[in-house]
Amino acid sequence: QVQLVESGGGVVQPGRSLRLSCVASGFTVSSYAMHWVRQAPGKGLEWVAALSYGGINEHYAESVRGRFTISRDTSKNTLYLQMNSLRAEDTAVYYCARALPDYWGQGTLVTVSS
Amino acid sequence: DVQMTQSPSTLSASVGDRVTITCRASQSISTWLAWYQQKPGKAPKVLIYKASSLESGVPSRFSGRGFGTEFTLTIDSLQPDDFATYYCQDYSDYSRTFGQGTKVEIK
């Protein structure tokens, strides 16, 4: 069945970088648009980035544009989110999600703190 | 960018009640609207897509209506498992814009 498993979260200092991974099973990431969505503690859902199903087009929320990069490795069926110049306001649970989204991972917590 | 506004932010209701949540888009999104349910510590779960299509496996007490800029999610006969936070989401383009959420609480 379809499954998404995120990893790579943790505690990081402001200004540093982190890369999140999302391993997909039950489908191929190259056949769907894929997204990263985040949720700050006690807050609502915020869309972060999308990668088109062809892997050509990347789209970003204004809050992360120029700092975050979404990518994929089709040989590993894995989606990535490279996060640079992290800020305290990037602290959140990060979910990868497929298409609509109809399937979501369980999320990985990123805490940006000195 | 499309902005999504949900109301109310919090809704207190009892088991068996019929509840309605409203979502307004800042511009027409046709029927490119989904509704999600989220429980604490869990990922969101899709309930409705294309404004009114029920996702497979979702109970029929959930229904969605609307077109353009005005949408509603209705839960007929609220069940204990339905106390959660609900989000609307626009998917008219590659980005995804969520409403701020409606928390359905036990009265």
Image: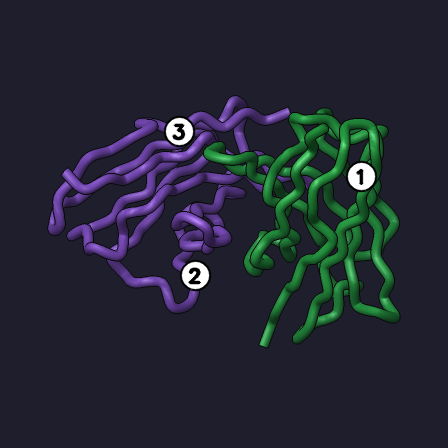
Chain colours: A green, B purple
Q: Which residue is drawn at the image coordinates 69% and 33% (left, top)?
A: A112
Given the image, what chain letter belongs to the residue carrying mark 1? A
From the viewer's perspective, tell me whether residue B96 is left or right of residue B45. right
Residue lying furthest top in this view?
Answer: B26
Q: Which residue is drawn at the image coordinates 79% and 53% (left, top)?
A: A80
Q: What residue type is labelled 2?
A: Glu
- Which mark, residue B6? 3
Given the image, what chain letter belongs to the residue carrying mark 2? B
Query: What distance separates the C-alpha of mark 3 from that of mark 1?
Result: 30 Å
Q: What residue type is labelled 3?
A: Gln
| Mark 3, other Cα within 10 Å: few <14 / some 14–19 / many ≥20 | many
Query: What distance separates the C-alpha of mark 1 from that of mark 2?
Result: 33 Å
Q: Circle 1 is placed at which residue position?
A: A83
Given the image, what chain letter belongs to the residue carrying mark 3? B
- Quarter where residue A49 is shown: top right
| Mark 2, other Cα within 10 Å: few <14 / some 14–19 / many ≥20 | some
- Which mark, residue B55? 2
Residue lying furthest front in this view?
Answer: A114
Query: What distance separates the C-alpha of mark 2 from that of mark 3?
Result: 21 Å
